[in-house]
Amino acid sequence: MKQVVQNYKSGELALLEVPEPACKPGGVLVRTVYSLISTGTEMMKVSEASLSLVGKAKARPDQVAKVMQSVATNGLSATYRKVTSKLDSYTPLGYSLCGIVEQVGDGITDVAVGDLVACAGNEHALHSELNWVPKNLYSRVPAGVDPRHAAFGTVGSIAMQGVRRGEPQIGDVALVIGLGLIGQLVVQLLSSSGVRVVGVDPDPERCKLAESLGALTCAHPASGIVDTAVDELTHGAGVDQTYLAAGGNTNDPVELAAKLSRDRGRVIDIGKCKLDLPWNAYYEKELDVRFSRSYGPGRYDPSYELEGRDYPIGQVRWTERRNLECVLDLIARDRLDVEPLITHVSDFSDAVSTYKSLNEGELKAVAVLFRYPDAVARTEPVVTSARVGLIEHKAAPLPAGQPVRLGFIGAGNYASSMLLPHLVERSDVQLKHVSTTSALSGANARRKFGFAAASTDIDDVLGDSSIDAVFVVTRHSSHAELTRQALLAGKSVFVEKPLALSADELQKVLDAIEESGNDRLQVGFNRRFAPLLHEARGQFGPRVGPATVRYLVNAGRLDHSSWYNQTATEGSRFAGEGGHFIDTVSWLLDADPVSVYATGDLQVTLGYPDGSTAVITYAETGSSGFPKETLDLTADGKVLKFDDFVRASVYSRKKWASSRIPKGRDKGQAAEVDAFLTAVRTGGPMPIPVASLAATTLATLAAQSSVSNAAPVRIELPNKAGAPA
């Protein structure tokens, strides 16, 4: 594998071929997807390496002191050999990354192979294709978080620890000196905590960036603008905290901190800057000077970092790992935005030239990421629908007393046995026209269900202005196109699952909605309407924390003559059926999936925004004597158990069990049809938002993509339907 290294003696940077690390107990082996260059700490190290020996000594007086002690203890000759040997060795770079767990060591139970994790540590989160990372230095990335953003986890933790050391309170005024990477993150963390922030930096572009991320005013330290802003915001009292996020050898930051701080204010040193404190200024205001040690408690403690011994939360609330988890949570909830900080993304193969460009000033950047193309390809395929920017449209209600006039395209076995029987006896419905591929099947449907007319031409249905709503109940391959045409014709549409067999087909449906302004669409996901499942969900009650769901679908083998076997034209069996089960889980969790990981035996793992997970096992090799669908939902100390639409129970402080075994299995078709007709009649919203229909469809398609790529797939819907684009 390859790793970025530097020779501190010569300053040489190299992308070196090194052996792969072993997966030791107490940690995980992580394949890097993105790693972040710390444009402060790392570039300082790179710059120092290019200095002469005298320059290095001036830059690191702490190391000179160690050398002198070694001379006194071991003699000049031995110390010289030791120092030159160390200087002439390659040292690693990097300490913040995001990657995929490739192997799990003994004793690790909180992550599994394939999980996306953020990693920390200048010995464990290196710019390297593979890293072994101990337990307390990684954290699972919440579903939906971009791996590029998760790579900021460590630097975000450094900024967060600095903010914690400042102990800000709502309404405080804070000064951030230095608006590089850490400073920009500090600005956002303070702003999101209700603190009014003023920033200082000589670079006007960084000042503009900080203002866009929440700072009230930012300016050059010599401009006088900051002084005026602080005076106005604090009525002349001075800032409550000053955060030193600057580097360099100037003493200006600590002098400015003293000048603009209030009496007994706090000064927190996060960066590595000169700290020649002006005694009188700090004494007269009795300023509280605090240091912030890296990413938080646990740093530099081998028992915590290497042996995995956590500190009790009652004693140490925020450790390295808890800070890392908190940063990722803020990113997941859009409370910390790191996207504007990404100045440049470079392929890992160009690492050396990227460092040189940064060091020589050719590349001016706040944050630079290394992208590991092979890992990205394996771990980050994205199924996305880029144009879901739909506004929910209200429809006019039908005139009072007018029945809902329906047209059917297709009248096969499912339509005849599961849908039409719920319509034929309703006085508020008029079956106007049925179109089928076979004249005889149309005639049979007209005779059995009382359609006013039958034909083999779909235009007879779509072109009939008197028809209010159309049911599309044909083979899978035609669903998307017929739905698109019906929406453009201004009809309300009920289409059986699946809505589409590809992302392109789905996009055409969404484009038709946007073009026509007609979003009157429902997909036949009937299970969410099943009465017994509704009753069980009600007994389970509201959910607070993340949930886990296990859903076993004992699908059984297909008859060899089934048209479901025509995968070349009709899609895979799971593409046709899987949406049922994904939609059911999403309804139970009241959220749409944001990630999918599927294995070849069709065990599909779904990730949800709040950290909930669901595993759907779609089995074709089980016994026909076993129930077809069994589901368990666990959260908040409660368990919901659902057995094949026959019985259900909820285990909590008091156990609830369904009171009776229903006659037959009501899977919700009647309630589903009723909900659709109510929406058409009243002009109210459709039972399932279009964005949810799209997310379920994409997740169903993503399962096959995940199997093909042996990698997780992210689901992205940039603009939710129901909200302005």
Image (spheres, rainbow, N blue to C red):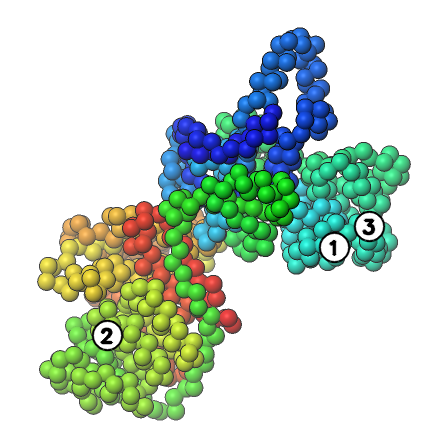
Locate residue 305, reporting x and y percent.
Answer: 53, 30
Looking at marks 2 and 1 on the same chain, the residue that comes earlier in the sequence is marked by 1
In the picture, residue 295 is in which quadrant?
top right
Name the residue tied to disc 2: 473
Name the residue tied to disc 3: 222
* Residue found 20% across the figure and 77% down from its top: 410
- Mark 1 to mark 3: distance in Å? 12 Å
* Residue found 38% across the figure and 48% down from its top: 377
In the picture, residue 447 is in which quadrant?
bottom left
Q: Nearer the viewer, residue 552 or 20?
A: 20
Whether residue 617 is visible to the viewer of this picture, yes or no, is: yes
Q: Say if mark 2 contacts mark 1, CB within 8 Å.
A: no
Q: Does 261 sit left or right of 643 as displayed? A: right
Whether residue 627 is visible to the viewer of this picture, yes or no, is: no
Amino acid type, residue under disc 1 in the picture: Cys
Locate residue 524, reporting x and y percent.
Answer: 29, 70
Q: Closer to the camera: disc 2 or disc 1?
A: 1
Image quadrant holding the N terminus, namely top left
Say how many tags the image has.
3
On residue 235, the disc is none
Q: Say if mark 1 contacts mark 3, CB within 8 Å.
A: no
* Residue found 36% across the figure and 81% down from its top: 488
Locate residue 337, reporting x and y percent.
Answer: 58, 54
Amino acid type, residue under disc 3 in the picture: Ala
Amino acid type, residue under disc 2 in the picture: Val
Q: Nearer the viewer, residue 184 or 419?
A: 184
Name the residue tied to disc 1: 218
* Residue found 18% across the figure and 50% down from its top: 622
